[in-house]
Amino acid sequence: MAATAAAPGAASYLLLSPRRSRAASPSFRAAAPRFRSPRCVLGSEQLRVVDGVKRTGGVEPRGAVWTPKAPAPEAGLAALPREVRDSRMKIFSGTANRPLSQEIAAYLGVDLGKILIKRFADGEIYVQLQESVRGCDVFLVQPTCSPVNENLMELFIMIDACRRASARSITVVIPYFGYARADRKAQGREAITAKLAANLLTEAGSDRVIVCDIHSTQALGYFDIPVDHIYGQPVILDYLASKTISEDLVVVSPDVGGVVRARAFAKKLFDAPLAIVDKRRQGHNMSEVMHLIGDVKGKVAIMVDDMIDTAGTITSAAALLKQEGAEAVYACCTHAVFSPPAIERLSGGIFEEVIVTNSILLPEDKCFPQLTVLSMANLVAETIWHVHRDGSVSSIFQ
């Protein structure tokens, strides 16, 4: 996916080098000038947009990219000769977000596994592995984003193909876990689809699941197999650390359910104060903002959530923050679902910047000038390597 055209005189960047040291990131209050135009981190092409002109090659991007404080010594596989790399680790990609899978494989220094995925005339999905996985640790990268049902079914069939090909272990890597929102019975006669999806992944033959910023952590208990839950916060925090925003910050949770997430984010962001927007939901994808808990007057508000779907909650909350005297409002989330009319709401000018990750592949028609897309490939790749080497995943975030 290519980024939309940058505004005249604006500078923006795309792929950030995964080899860049964390120590090279400038401090939060002494950083490079701010940018204003789409900045997308997608695909393996090192591409930069300067004054509206695309440039490729070995350019030094500005900004910050997440890198582990103590990366695994073996993680730099790209520098090793191919014959000494671990051939028992196989990474396959579904069709939902192949650019992210390519970045993960590039970070680990391996090639994506060869796989044939096609659809018959009636819509049925056909999957065939085109290389041997016998005795290998297989990692299947597939976010279950829109079209949710197709991507989920495709993942089931990929798991079955690997199981029948005698893979030693099958780990499904789900950057965005669909159906996680229905994680409890709020009303009578409702389905708990988070539990159903967990059961289906287990029955299909997966041995382990890696998910990122699942909507509710209680859904992790629905799995009867090991689950590694990783967080997209380090990616966003490192990016914010490269910007000069303001010393007077406040982290805002757009609803009461996200208070724990926002509190953890605020603690890592120089122990910033916390504010909460109290809202009452009238129906699915519909919400009404009621009032604000906390002080945002004269401050820069950074709103934190796990996903943005139709953007009704976050834009209503942002309007309230503006009414309460916030100087500027930034929106941060891991998963950019962006269902209509999210683009119209987010690009309306109420947000200074909308910061997301590439857990979901965004087409060109969902990009807008305030959007910044950060790559989480390094984070996922480090997790895969630690799982493969029986290492501690939690040590990545310490």
Image (spheres, rainbow, N blue to C red):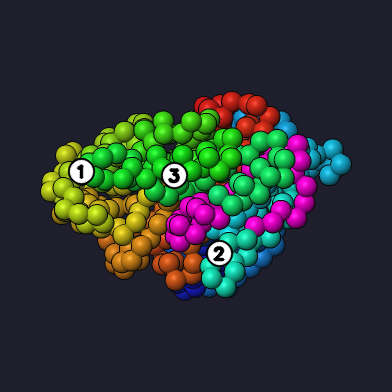
Residue 187's mark? 1
Q: Residues within 10 Å of mark 2 (few under 14, many from 20)?
A: few
Q: Is residue 256 magenta?
A: no
| Callout 1 secondary element | loop
Task: State the residue position of label 3.
Answer: 197
Residue type, mark 2 in image: Glu
Give the percent coordinates (x, y) of residue 269.
Answer: 39, 36
Q: Which one is closest to the eye, mark 3 or mark 2?
A: 2
Looking at the picture, how far across and down is residue 344, in whole percent? Answer: 31, 68
- Residue contact at pointers 1 and 2, CB within 8 angstroms: no
Asked if one can make out residue 337 in the rendered structure from this viewpoint, the answer is yes
- In the rendering, at what x and y percent does residue 197 appear? 44, 44
Q: Mark 3 near mark 2, Cβ–Cβ under 8 Å? A: no
> Magenta segment: does it hold 148?
yes
In front here: 231 or 97? 97
- Residue displayed at 36% across by 33% down: 218
Q: What mark, if any, has residue 58 been given in the picture?
A: none
Residue at image position (69%, 49%) is 106
Q: Is residue 34 visible?
A: no
Left or right: residue 320 versus residue 332 is: left
| Nearer-N-terminus badge (1/2) | 2
Check disc 1: other Cα within 10 Å, few if <14, some if 14-19, many if 20+.
few
How far apart, in angstroms, are the residues tagged by discs 3 and 1? 20 Å
Q: Which residues are magenta?
A: 127-155
Q: Residue under circle 2?
A: 124
Question: Circle 3: is it few (<14), some (14-19), or many (20+) Cα within 10 Å?
Answer: some
Q: Is residue 121 above or below residue 132?
A: below
Left or right: 336 in relation to 383: left
